[in-house]
Amino acid sequence: MLSDKLQLYKINKILKRINQLSPKMKQMSDSDLKKQTAKFKTMLSQGENLDDILIEAFATVREVDYRVLGMFPYDVQVMGAIALSKGFIAEMKTGEGKTLTATMPLYLNALTGQGAMLVTTNDYLAQRDGDLLRPVYENLDLTVSIAVSDKNQNVSSSQKRQWYNSDIVYTTASSLAFDYLFNNLITDKEDQYMRPFNYAVIDEVDDVLLDQAEMPLIVASKNNLQSNLYELTDTFVNFLKQDRDYIFKDNKRLVWLTYYGVKKAEKYFRIENLFSADNRELYRHIILALKAHYCMVNRRDYAVIRGKVVLFDERNGRLQKGVQISTGLHQAIETKEKVSLSPTKKSAATITFPGLFNLFNKIAGMSGTAKTNEEEFLNTYNMKVICIPTNKPIIRKNYRAKVFLTTSDKLLAAIKKTISLHETGRPVLLVTGSVENSEIVSELLLNYGVANNVLNAFNIPYEAKIIANAGKRGAVTIATNMAGRGTDIKLSSDVKKLGGLAVIGTEMLSKRMQLQLSGRAGRQGDPGSSQFYISLEDDYVAKDSTFKFKKGYRRLFNAKKKGKKIIQLHSPLIKLSLKLLQERIEEKAAMTRMVTNLNAKCLGKQRELFYIWRNNIIKTKNLENEVADLIDQVIDIYLKQTDNWDAGKIKDLVNNHITYQAVDIPEITNTQDAKKVITKISQQVLEKKKKKLINNQQLNKFYHQVYLHTMDILWTDQVYYMERLPIYTNYWQVSGHPSEYIYQKWAYESFLTFESKLKQKIAEEILLSTIYIDKKNNIIVEFV
Ligand code: ADP
């Protein structure tokens, strides 16, 4: 708290100095303002740093914001901007104008010439904000791009290069992540389009770095690996009995086999040991089938639409079309639902948002709700959260939550409340926990004669339009949790005197989600209210409640069944238990994210090393030394196989790895001589190959092809292995071993193996592959 006050004090001091410069800026002509950019750049090149020029730079942008957009950033916006420039997270409430705030830190940080990005959560916002603010930056002599498109695949490399070389880039976290992955799959230096990442302001930072932290973004490779294990295991799990053969923890979404289950599997599949290395895949598929059957619920976690399994995004109830869980769970669900299997995709490259933003020199974030997760931001990302005061005081009324016993009691009460609010003319935003509930509630309201708009998985195209109307007199909007976030609900003028927008939540949520929802009402000093209707049957409560809590619920439920009238619960004890439950769930979620981040870091480190290696190969024009060195290393690896070499063994080795031709091997007794012989043969093979090629340039073309082809294939396998690793290591956790330790150990070992295998494979392809030159003098490599 003290450090917060201190930070705000410091920020205020800077603000004062910016304000003092305002009159001077007002007197400057448009072209003088434009010239400021060149002046700042010179100052930077002469050794001044960003903090030295911040005050004048911010004052400059502020004036240009006003001249171009007619909006002069409020003092609180400048405060937010200062925080962002320092790499903090600025907590600014909905409607405070985060879009305009970001112009200042983006301008300042782009002056370094290394680029500044604004990362939003969806294409619509990137486009809207980029379009709006482009003239501001262009009037300051900076280049701007909006790096999103409808069909990202069709954008040319040169177009993308222009995007990413712009001073300021508006984009989304997922476009950026995919472009980064694709950029690193490119085989020609000329086709790469990205420069190193410098500075980013992440909008809705809690959504990107917390809620979506665990979702990997995946570029699938073309290799298909279909397996009939899905069907076998799908049938098998039907024979299992809960608690005897497998244990299922709904709250943790964890499921595992007991001793009896393991024995049953060994019998069913006629194997000796389910946990032997040979049966890893089988074990993995059994767990996937169990998960598909018991953790994934139709219409809660996914829907079957026209013969396809489509996942729900847990956060906002939207359908994630085209998104697949890459570990095979998708196929397992498809098998369970008896729809045709989509081809298993192996990932060629994958990254998480935390992994992506780790690559920046500096990041900052904005959100209406970040303070509740302050500690996690500090521990995981080393980012401080600063609460920026609102421009006008908040007068929204947050009413205390009402607690009900059952879902239907809760929904009926929420509907009644909606109707009575609607009758006063106030607009209502009714938020439900699932797609199904949004439909039920909508229908019930219609039965009462209340027209309403539904914002859920099935009508995203109308989202922005519905939100734009949600603040009008008498509007009733039903939405799933996060739908429409980022678009402001503006009140029509007649609604303000009626009390503004009323937000009604109908599900228990995390503290941060609750604040997010309430924040949709009462923007910029508007009137408004919020209230939550929750029940003991809410998913959030049921998934994680303690034994004692469940017992209490059952007692009340039975009493109600016997005729006792129990609808709303007033007991302070219940309210306290719910509060404790909420804290416990949040702590656990943070823990899970920590473990996932740890795993992502492991893969991130490997990815970094691999990409450095790969980029080095792309950059190096002449690979001859590299190849000689690699073959030498690989021969050493081969020679480790045994200590007593003889002519026969060497012959086998040479025929397996170096040439298919017959070779004469002299009688050899020690390893040193063996090395000499093998080295000589491989040099001869290489010389022969070189003679086939026209010139040195073509030889290097051949080397490049072999390197990149082999690297990409083996890296895909490595990513595939790393993706599945948590499934294997989770088993250790269940049996009481620390799974993070096992994970890290196995991950590290697997990378060493990968490196060694890769080197061997490259050497083999260089020596054993066949090459042709076609009529147009192109080389064609027939890989081994
Ligand atoms: P947030 O993202 O913080 O919810 P937005 O950036 O969407 O808020 O801005 C909310 C509204 O406030 C926008 O319509 C914007 O035009 C307006 N606005 C923001 N800053 C100012 C300002 N300094 N002066 C006037 N209007 C502003």
Image (spheres, grey):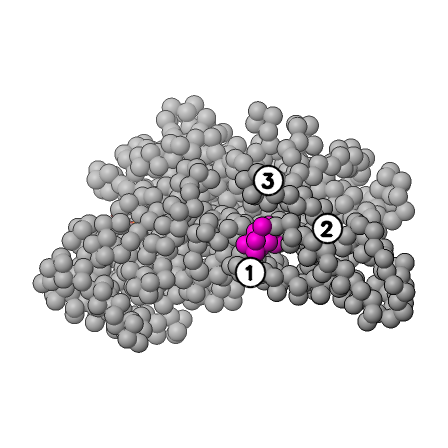
**Tags 1 and 3 touching, CB below 8 Å:** no
From the viewer's perspective, tell me whether residue 86 is left or right of residue 221: left
Q: Residue under label 1, please give it.
A: 622
Mark 2 residue CB less than 8 A from any atom of ligand 1: no
Element carrying mark 2: helix
Element carrying mark 3: loop
Is 761 rendered above or below residue 225? below
The segment highlighted magenta reads: 694-705
Classify residue 24 by image quadrant. bottom left
Is residue 535 in view? no
**Disc nearest the viewer among 3 and 2:** 3
User: Could you tell which of marks 1 and 3 lies nearer the N-terminus?
Assistant: 1
Residue at left 20%, top 64%? 36
- Distance, label 1 to label 2, CA atoms, is 21 Å
Query: How many numbered circles are shown?
Result: 3
Residue at left 66%, top 63%? 628
Residue at left 50%, top 56%? 356
Is residue 617 in view? yes
Quadrant in which the N terminus is drawn = bottom left
Q: Residue under label 2, please give it.
A: 768
Is 289 rendered above or below residue 51? above
Amino acid type at mark 2 = Leu
Q: Position of residue 54 (x, y in %)?
A: 27, 69
- Distance, label 3 to label 2, CA atoms, is 19 Å
Q: Position of residue 468 (x, y in %)?
A: 31, 37
Q: Residue under label 3, please give it.
A: 774
- Distance, label 1 to label 3, CA atoms, is 23 Å
**Disc nearest the viewer among 1 and 3:** 3
User: Could you tell which of marks 3 and 2 lies nearer the N-terminus?
Assistant: 2
